Amino acid sequence: MYDLAQAAAALGAAPSVAVVSHVNPEGDAIGSVLAAVLALRGAGKRTGAFNADPTPPGLQHLPGVAEFRREVPQDRPYACYLVLDTADLPRTGGLLDGRPRDAVVLNVDHHPGNTRFGDVNWVEPGASSAGEMVYRLLREMALPILPDVAANLYAAILTDTGGFRYGNTTAESLRVAAELVTAGAVPETIAEGLVANRDPREWRLLSEVLAGLTVTAGGRVAWIEVTVAARQRAGVGLEVTEDFIQYPRNLAGVRLAVAFKEISADEVRVSLRSHGEVDVARLAGAFGGGGHRNAAGCTIRDGLAAAKAQVLAAAEALWA
């Protein structure tokens, strides 16, 4: 594939690479970044892993996770900025704002709404995950897939396919996962790390959130809200709430799940998940967001009550 070859050539030519992903990161963002950092460093390049937000607790076990920094240092600039799993440049949280003018921005992503913001773009909506794409990129560069790299890529694919349950699970993603196991990824260890390292305070917050779970639109829409006050009572950050949306999504009959996460009095993050043909990327796009058909999100610059009213009205209108 021409775009893949271009991406591999750009990375191969760069002596130093900053690997970046989107704000509010999840398993695909974290795993694909770490895999790229470790593999490229093994090839003799100076590398760094960057994300503007903290790594969620359930991903702290991944190999190399201590590599992450919240800001890109300005005193040692990078020749290439590899941006993974990110549909547009603002989603990096400003991490590329101080880059040198001659730095190459390499955009590798699987979101259909990607804005092609890079100097080199490899965008493949048919891929299950950025992790799957990074695997193919490393293979194109003839770099070895060592066990720590394999573990991160397996975690990336596992999380973005919902444990191989979502519609983006393909024969290719399963083939890549099998090859990663052969390369040293241990499925049991990775899966246990994703679910078995939780803080009791997270469950206290979850219990409060689920107490307010609401089902509307004749049972087709379910939503939850995570307020600032609830997080403060529990003593945890927003990063622990990444998986909360799975609970309304898994209710019988629900086709669309929504999680409203209050950031401040005038900012709300909205996560959207769906089953089948319900296109939440289009719904998120109506509010300036984006994503995939069955997993998307947006940020609304308004109060929680107003954000709920707007999004729920648009969601319920799908069955009007």
Image (cartoon, rainbow, N blue to C red):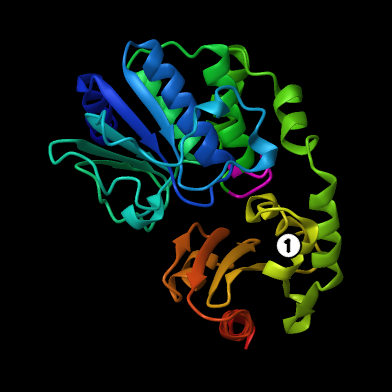
Q: How would you classify the magenta stretch by its main secondary structure? A: loop
Look at the picture and state if 281 lies above or below 60.
Answer: below
Percent from the top left, x then y, of residue 298?
50, 67
Residue, x 63% and y 18% (percent of image)? 185
Which quarter of the image is occupied by the C terminus? bottom right
Percent from the top left, x then y, of residue 81?
29, 36
Q: Quadrant of residue 177?
A: top right
Number of other residues with Cα within 10 Å of mark 1, as a class: few under 14, some 14 to 19, many 20 or more: few
Percent from the top left, x then y, of residue 180?
57, 19
- Left or right: 20, with 64 as reference point: left
Residue closest to the eye, 233 or 91: 233
Residue type, numbered disc 1: Gln
Look at the picture and state if 33 lies above or below 202.
Answer: above
Magenta region: which residues? 160-167
Indicate yes or no whether the magenta region holds residue 40.
no
- Left or right: 117, with 205 as reference point: left
Q: Can I make out residue 226 in this image? A: no
Q: Quadrant of residue 188?
A: top right
